[in-house]
Image (spheres, grey):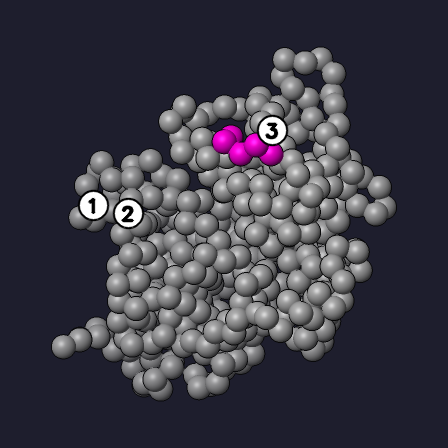
Amino acid sequence: MRIYSRISMSTSSLLLCLFASASSFLTHHSNIGAHRQSHRAILGCSFGKMKRSTCFSSLKMMETIECDVAIVGGGPAGCTCALYTSRADLKTVILDKNPHVGALAITSHIANYPGVDKAMTGEELLDQMRQQAIDYGTDYRRAQVFMIEVEEGDGKKYSKTIYTPEATVKARSLILATGAMGRSSAPFPGEEEFLGQGVSYCATCDGAFYRDSEVAVFGVSVEAMEEALFLTKFASTVHWITPTSPWTDDDEHVKDLLAKDNVKHWSKTKFISVEGEPSGVTGMKVKQIEEEEEEVIPVEGVFIYALGGGSKPITDFIQNQVELNEDGGVKVNEDMEASVKGVYAIGDVRNTPYKQVVVAASDGCIAAMSIDKYLKGRKSVKVDWIHK
């Protein structure tokens, strides 16, 4: 594929382009047109949103983190893996885009996880899992991963590189734990066409490009509200478009967002299409339920956080670096190791039919023990790690 040949070019020149349109390369919620649009996304610096000098400056300022274990995804699989690797005295970093949007986080009650009271919510359980990993030394960071580069490892060198807008992580081993909440619904008209030219899925990646401009955010999830709130720092006006109003009056996310002077809320409004011209997005066509006519909101950026059923493995950022199964899940062996030595995949990103919290947690445990064996050159798995 075209994208694979571009990945092989030098890291500096590749990152130069990627920095200008990171979120077009990866979407946490959408696999829409990723491969067809990757060429456009990689040429982000040519879109006029960032000067070459700015790209190089940003690259130089990026923090570089070295670790033994890098985990992409902070759900039950990732947190369990981190708990075990941290207890094994392996320097572990979790990169988690948003702790509020995964399959477990949005589950209202947990009744079938051993030892957990049935009144506990999924988010409460996940909070405990995350904190337990942190207490044992895990470095937890909220960050969106937009690309990885992996080489066959020997357990000694930093052969895995993970790119985020804020930092580059170099690791001896890499765990993919991004789940299967990928959006499976059809793209909106114009969404694919303007991906990387005004359409984005990551405000923290692209928000600064829209300083003093008007932008639109579509979605009613916590993630959508947090991203819209972030955009208020840069945009002159943030148009928040929601198809429904499912929240309560005391929702803190809603209160915080609507308290901003530069937020305009379009409630019960249907997203029709993204409008634009060859240079990029010029507007978002919508229709309010109570109105007969459609209208176009003039904006330069459209940030989409649509719900899509939550059944598609989130693998866009992988970009053929490891082998996938026909069903889209990452292919692994019994040790949870992927097709590249030192890369592992756990939880729903494998697209296992057994999408349960306890299964995800067990995947994390298996991968952690396999990693300990791999990095420390053991001939067999060490059943438990005892700390004095």
Q: Residue furthest front?
A: 261
Of tags 1 and 2, the one toward the viewer is 2
Would you name the residue on which mark 2 appears? 125
Which quarter of the figure is the N terminus placed in? bottom right
Label 2 to label 3: alpha-carbon separation: 35 Å
Instruction: Give the residue drawn at x 33%, y 44%.
Output: 123
Q: Residues within 10 Å of mark 2 (few under 14, many from 20)?
A: many
> In the image, what residue type sits under mark 2?
Leu
Label 1 to label 2: alpha-carbon separation: 8 Å
Which residue is more in the foreground, 341 or 8?
8
In magenta, the rendered stretch is: 258-262
Q: Quadrant of residue 51?
A: bottom right
Residue 260 in magenta stretch = yes
Which residue is more in the foreground, 23 or 282?
282
> In the image, what residue type sits under mark 3?
Lys
What's the magenta bit mostly, secondary-structure-wise?
loop
